[in-house]
Amino acid sequence: MGQINNLNSSDIPDIFRRLRILEMASPLNNAAIGRSGLLVYDGGVITIENGGLNVTGTATISGVLNADGTVTLSGTVAISGPLTVTGATHLNGVTDIAGNTTVTGDFTTNGPMKTTGTLSVEGVTTLKNDLNVTTGGKIKAGGLTMDPSVASGALVFSNGAQVFTDASSIQVYKGTSVVQVENGTAKVQGDGSHWLKVDANGVTIGGLPTTTQPANLYQDPATGRLYRSTAP
C-alpha cells in the first residue's frame, strides 16, 4: 500500500519541531565514546566546573601536567624519571630508600637516626655532645685503638704500647717497662727488679747496683729508700 500525502497538511511545522528538539538537546550529558575516541585539537580545552573526572582505566600524559591546586595520591606511585621538588616536602610515614642518595645542602635530623650498615664520613666531623660506644665497641684512629675491654679502658697502639687505667692508677706500658701514677705515688719500672718510686716518704729505688766509690747517698737496705748522706 503506497503512502498518501495530504496536500492540506504541510510538513514544515514538523520540521521546525524536530529542529527545536535538536537545538534544546544536550547529547553530551550522558554520552559514551567508543574506540574511535575523542580528539580536542587546535588549542581546544576541556573545562570541568563544579564536577569531577573519574578515570578507572589508564590516563596517559605525554606532555606537561600542571597542577596548581591540591594533589592527593592515595595509591602506589611509581616515578621512573628525575623528580625535582622546589618547595617544602613532608614525609610523615615510613620512607625506604634503596638507591644512592646525594644531599648537596644541609641535612638536619631532629629525631634519632639509626644506621645498621657501614657509615663512611669523608669530611671534617664535629661532635658537640657525647659519643657513646656500647656493646664492646672500639674507637680506632689509624694505628691507635681505644679499647674499653682492656683493664678499665686503654689506648692501644699498633707497636704494642698501651696507656690504660685500673682501679687506682693510670699506667703507660711498653714491653716490661711501666710508668705508673696513682694518688700520691709515681713509679717508673724498667723491668721486674729495677724501679724508682716517689711518694710521701721520699724516693725509693729497687735493684740499685753497688760500687766501691765513697758514698754521697745512702739507701736503706731494708726498704730501698734513698737518702742524701750528711756523714763526714
Image (cartoon, rainbow, N blue to C red):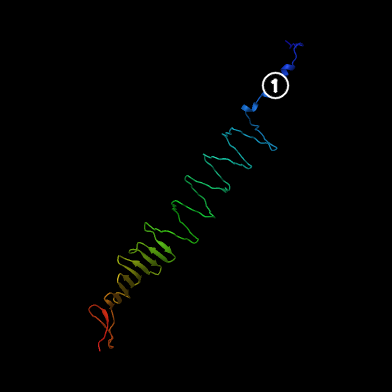
Vertical position of residue 152 compared to residue 68: above or below: below
Q: Is residue 168 left or right of residue 72?
A: left
What percent of the width, then of the height, locates residue 146? 39, 64
Q: Quadrant of residue 231?
A: bottom left
What percent of the width, then of the height, locates residue 97? 50, 49
Residue at 68%, 21% in the rendered image: 21
Disc 1 element: helix
What percent of the width, then of the height, locates residue 221? 23, 80
Q: Quadrant of residue 232?
A: bottom left
Vertical position of residue 2 compared to residue 82: above or below: above
Answer whether residue 23 is visible to the viewer in this image. yes
Q: Is residue 194 left or right of residue 5?
A: left
Vertical position of residue 191 compared to residue 72: above or below: below
Number of numbered discs on residues: 1
Furthest-left residue in view?
A: 222
Answer whether residue 176 is visible to the viewer in this image. no
Vertical position of residue 108 compared to residue 171: above or below: above
- Under mark 1, the amino acid is Arg
User: Local crowd at mark 1 within 10 Å, few (<14), some, or many (≥20)?
Assistant: few
Q: Is residue 72 left or right of residue 165?
A: right
